[in-house]
Amino acid sequence: MTAVVTAHGLTKRFGDVTALDDVSFALAEHTIYGLLGPNGAGKTTLMQILTGQAFASSGNVSVFDAPPVENPAVLSKVCFVRESQRYPHVYTVRHVFHTARRLFANWDDTFAHGLAADFQLPAGRLVRGLSRGMLSALGVTVGLAARAPLTFFDEPYLGLDPAARQLFYDRLLADYAGHPRTVVLSTHLIDEVSDLVERVLLIDRGRLVLDEDADDLRGRAVAATGRAEAVDGFAAGRTELHRERLSGLVRSTILDGLGPHAKALAQTLNVELEPLSLQQLVVRLTAPPTTVPPTTTAPADREAAR
Amino acid sequence: MNRIRQVVRLQMPAWPQIVGWTWGMTAVAFGINLLSVMANYDPGDGVTNTGGLVSLCGVAIGMATVSVTQIFPYALGMSVTRREFYLAWSLLAVVQSVVYALVLCLLRAVEQATGYWGWGMRFFGLPFMDDANPVLLLLGYAVPMLVVTHLGILLGTLYLRWGTTGVLASLTLTFTALGLAATLITWTRQWDAIGRWLLDQSPTALLAGWPVLVAAAFAVGGYRLIRRATA
């Protein structure tokens, strides 16, 4: 793979808070990434460092084979759409498009105006007068029409209704087909993007928990439901992420190692198996520790799963 | 350079406001001064100096500060580097200072042609520039404008780095340092020497030479601050 971004031992501290803790990964060109994790996990901080907007405390970052900080050659290929992007008070939507056209080399004006029409963005309106949803639509439009080889979307659709979000996914995929690039999509609406993203990066409390192909992840975890002894029998030797009791039955979330005989074993034990969605998997992997220790081996297994 | 020009244009949508407020407020200051001179008018008084240009400097500082704090976070979001932003804003400061200086030269000419607005009020002209040649006159307006604009930019970068606390703390420290320096000069009876030194300077050095160094010092300070600023 051709790496567009590489990070080694990336750490960011704010006083005694460690926002990113020894994070290492690479982003390949022409791939759509889902950057997932709970609030405060460090997603925005990570994207700010990768785009030269913030400074790492330690570790190395390389974007298009060079450090991104204050590097015009790198940043001209990067677009970062922030949920909390601030716009000058006097700017209208039209002003934003004009400046974006001048600053992004691959900007497509026709595409931008098409998107603005789709999202019903009023060109003459002051940006500070836009609703939350319209502000998101503006960010999404800039991010797509900039066609930057490396594009970050940080919670791009806060306040957008489902129809507008679907429009964003459709336009992103269609444009991506014609103009392949690396897209990093940070979001909490995991089920909505699970078919869109090709690879998943999961961060929790500043640490990289997962870096895997989305297809592999979809089959990686199951929920096993049955009587307690039966589930114990099935879960033995496997990594259990979570366990809950529902009226005499036990429902256990199991990661990895299903193996060829798992289905037969489940049938024998009368344990019902259902695949876990990406969103449920993320919830289980990043759940606060208080909800877990069902079995004595669980904590160690959780660590191993990381 | 082309990139810097594009970054400069980020300020374009704000120009009507910047120019409008700057000159609008200067016009109000002019009007109030004129009224007060008229209220006190005695033909035997000769020409009254107002020092009204201080208001123009004050507004220029404020405009530069607001422009930096408003547009920097947006520029950073549009993949502009801090260096490009700062160079663009320094360039803007130079252009704006020269344009404002030309306007002031023009207004000074009008002032003199109208017999100090008919009421003996000197608002745009400065007494110590009466003998200045046109080039020195232009510099005498442009360089102090450059100083105050860069001061405004510096205050803006202080805000970007450390917020309101940073600006207020810096101002407090500066006033403390200046106050202590003045006390020290008084204590060592050096005011006479300083006065003589000032009188020894040529008008060019006083109006354009030394202030350029002050502007450069502000510019270097602002540049160093903004290089580590985040939005």
Image (cartoon, grey):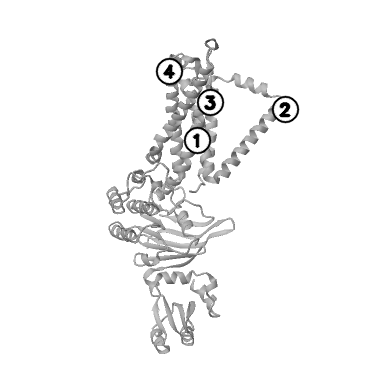
The circle on residue B187 is: 2
Relative to A32, is A221 above or below?
A: below
Which badge, 3 or 4, comes first in the chain's sequence? 4
Residue B131 in view in this figure = no
Say which of marks 2 and 1 sits in front: 1
Q: Is residue B226 left or right of residue A195?
A: right
Q: Position of residue B167 (x, y in %)?
A: 56, 41
Amino acid type, residue under disc 3 in the picture: Gly
Q: Single out the residue that lies furthest toward the bottom.
A: A268
Residues packed near mark 2 inside 10 Å, few (<14), some (14 to 19) or many (20 plus):
few
Q: Single out the residue that lies furthest toward the front.
A: B39
Say which of marks 2 and 4 sits in front: 4
**Location of residue A151 by image quarter:** bottom left
Chain containing mark 3:
B
Q: Which residue is mark 3?
A: B209
Which badge, 1 or 4, comes first in the chain's sequence? 1
Q: Is residue A135 left or right of residue B123?
A: left
Which badge, 2 or 3, comes first in the chain's sequence? 2
Q: Secondary structure at mark 1?
A: helix
Relative to A212, is B79 above or below?
A: above
The circle on residue B110 is: 4
Q: Which residue is mark 1?
A: B62
Chain containing mark 2:
B
Amino acid type, residue under disc 4 in the picture: Val
Which badge, 2 or 4, comes first in the chain's sequence? 4
Which badge, 2 or 1, comes first in the chain's sequence? 1
| In the rendered image, residues at marks 3 and 1 fall on the same chain | yes
Cα–Cα gap, marks 1 and 4: 27 Å
Q: Secondary structure at mark 2?
A: helix
